[in-house]
Amino acid sequence: MFAPRHEPLGLQFILGTSTGTICFLIALALFISNRTTDKIPRKRGIPFVGSWTFFTARHKFVTDGLKKLGNTFTFNVLHQWLLQHQVIVVAGEEARQVFFGHRDMDPEEGYSVLHGVAPKLSDADIKTGVSKDGGATHLAKRLAQLFRRDRISAGLRMVAQLTIRAMSCNEITDDDDLVSKVTELYWNIEEGSTASSVLLPWFPSKARNLKKESTAQLYLLLKEVYEARFNGDKVHSDTLQVLIDEGDSINDAIQFMMGAMFAGIVNTGIVCAWTMLYLLNNAMWKAKATEEIRAFIAKYAKSGGSLGSELRCDIVINGHKIPLGVFTALPITSAHHDPNIYPDPSKWDPERYARNEDKKERWAYLGWGTGRHPCSGMRFAKLEVKTILAPFLTLYEAEVLDKAGSKVTELPSPDCNSRKSKTPPSQPVYIKYRRVSL
């Protein structure tokens, strides 16, 4: 016979308290996950964790929900402190008009929670004076002010360098090593933006540490440049100088530059790569683009002429009342992959816009945002894409090959489930090129 072993009272208390806390949290998660919002169909996830696949296979998750539950459904996502956010997915023409047209939608907060890729000073435990409510306004105000300035004179280079010059400072742009370092840090931040680092930022995962360390390094680099400029006598004509002259604090200025550079370095570079592949794989459109570029050069050569939302009040979408404080998500694919709007939506067909397919419904094209929430840097991003494609199409002959060196007749499809811009195609492709005379 064995005598019962007596655990210390302190250990019994800790175990009992921990068990009670865990049971309470599980009960709370079950309660939250079973709530309904105005009888909106619910896509159920794992209790206490939520719909994790929204972050790991987003396209499949949303498409499956729209197919099974209709054009409005709700689900929960785990919050960083083990509570849950409610998210309502909406689709359709009416939903687009409210989502992009309602003045009380807050895209910054929605993007921060439901995507969480762009670097923020808080990722490196650094505080900024820009308020939560004023962050988007501050960004838009500074972008509008900067885009009124002449950006052509800064020089047209590769996307990363052009973005860094236009959105930060000359000290970095004029140093090739610093340009490479900043670009590497941004791709590390993007690589570290996984589901776990977004939903569990307090958990010391490899991805979370990569994002935090890269954000901190980027902050220190920009801080050093800011302080040298602020304490020096030399005045530059660049974005950093505008921010200093406008009285922005060091952290506010750095937060703006970090956010503004992210879109160009990460997103625009990927757009350039895919556009180049599509053009090289379609002789007719490549010829049209090249002809347009040559005509532009001939015309102007002698002149020397020289880019998710949070709800702030109750609204109604698709007949459902959406309460204050709930996150809403409108999947772009609900419009772009709708065959009733775009026949054969997976085909790369620029001529569909000449046929006005995107005009069949209001705001049916969402590539650059629309309504009250367009991309603030759209014009600059388009300039960057043209900066890369124009010289490539006119100065090089190129073709797309597979790893065996055979010509590719059908390009691989982008991975719509991936959260990362840098996700390679399922089948790698390569570009073989040679220089030709203009």
Image: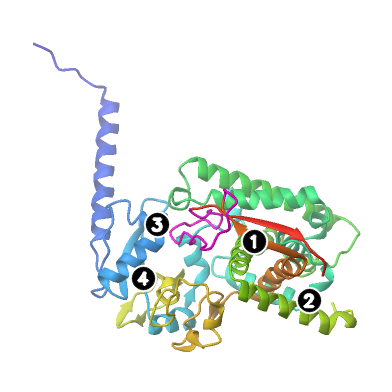
- From the top left corner, tell me how far across and down residue 300 is, in percent: 84, 82
- From the top left corner, tell me how far across and down residue 123 is, in percent: 56, 51
Going by the numbered disc 3, the residue's amino acid type is Ala
The answer to whether residue 125 is visible is no
The earlier-in-sequence mark between 1 and 3 is 3
Q: Quadrant of residue 335?
A: bottom left
Disc 2 is placed on an element classified as: loop
Along the line of sight, which residue is nearer the eye, 223 or 367? 367
With respect to residue 208, does 41 lie above or below? below
**Position of the C terminus by quadrant:** bottom right
Q: Disc 3 or disc 4, which is closer to the eye?
A: 3
In three-dimensional space, the C-alpha distance between marks 2 and 3, rounded to whole angstroms, equals 41 Å
Q: Disc 4 or disc 1, which is closer to the eye?
A: 1
Q: Tag 1: Cα neighbours inside 10 Å, few (<14), some, or many (≥20)?
A: some
From the viewer's perspective, is 78 left or right of 180? Answer: left
The earlier-in-sequence mark between 4 and 1 is 4
Q: Disc 1 or disc 3, which is closer to the eye?
A: 1
Q: Is residue 422 magenta?
A: yes
Q: Disc 1 or disc 2, which is closer to the eye?
A: 1
Q: Which residues are magenta?
A: 403-426
Going by the numbered disc 1, the residue's amino acid type is Glu
Going by the numbered disc 4, the residue's amino acid type is Val
Number of numbered tags placed on the structure image: 4
In three-dimensional space, the C-alpha distance between marks 2 and 4, rounded to whole angstroms, equals 39 Å
- From the top left corner, tell me how far across and down residue 273 is, in percent: 62, 62
User: Label 3, on which residue?
Assistant: 57
With respect to residue 344, does 416 lie above or below? above
Q: Residue at x 72, y 48 (%)?
A: 181
Magenta-colored segment: predominant secondary structure: loop
